[in-house]
Amino acid sequence: MTAAPVPSPAHNHDLHPPRALLRAIGALILFTLIGVGFTQLNKAGHVSNWRALSVQSMPLVFEDGADGSIDVRDPATGDMVRNWAPETGGFVRTAMRSLALQRRQMGIGSGPAFVLHRTENDKLIIEDPETGEWVSLDAFGGDNVAEFRKLLEPMETSP
């Protein structure tokens, strides 16, 4: 006895999304563009005078060690402020390399100091006075900011 053929399910090859979904997506895109345009034109949410809020500034020179470490020095004295051993301080490496890339693109060497600022509301900002670029470090989370906060603490010395 042969089994009766099983009917195949109907195939619907209509690949057009519903019009209501397309309208909702279009409205979302339009709303986003209008919102971004409004904030850019009115400088809403943009802190351009953060320097006025700075209560502590520290110029720093970052150097890559031959062994993969990061040495941070006071540019005035050459004294070591902090050292991150190889494979530590990942966020510091990433943040500083992104700022250094900007310098390389502009033909600026690694010699000039960066400036770490602490604002009156305890936010940290790293600034490159040579390029005018700056990064609000608090946007990257507490653990990452803690790495830069170590630069504001006195360095522990081994006996």
Image (cartoon, rainbow, N blue to C red):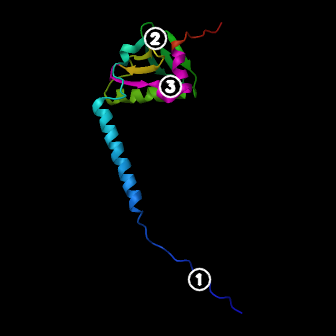
Q: Secondary structure at mark 1?
A: loop
In the image, is residue 34 part of the stretch drawn in magenta?
no
Q: Secondary structure at mark 2?
A: loop
- Asked whether, in this view, residue 94 is left or right of residue 132, the answer is right
Residue, disc 3: 92
The residue that appears at 34% across and 29% down in the rendered structure is 44
Image quadrant holding the C terminus, namely top right
Give the answer, above or below, for where 154 lies relative to 86.
Answer: above
Query: In terms of image quadrants, where is residue 2?
Result: bottom right
Q: Which percent across, then down, holds residue 65?
A: 51, 22
Q: Which percent across, then down, holds residue 98?
A: 42, 30
Classify mark 2: residues with Cα within 10 Å, few (<14), some (14-19) or many (20+).
Answer: some
The three-letter amino acid code for the residue at tag 1 is Pro
**How far apart, in angstroms, are the residues tagged by discs 2 and 1?**
80 Å
**Pair 3/2: label in front:** 3
Residue, disc 1: 7
Residue, disc 2: 74
Query: Is there a contact, CB below 8 Å, between mark 2 and mark 1?
Result: no
The residue that appears at 62% across and 83% down in the rendered structure is 6
Query: In terms of image quadrants, where is residue 17?
Result: bottom left
The three-letter amino acid code for the residue at tag 2 is Asp
Please, which residue is most extreme toward the left here? 41
Magenta range: 129-151
Q: Which percent across, then down, holds residue 28?
A: 38, 48
Image quadrant holding the N terminus, namely bottom right
Please, which residue is most extreme toward the right here? 1
Please, which residue is most extreme toward the bottom here? 1
The three-letter amino acid code for the residue at tag 3 is Val
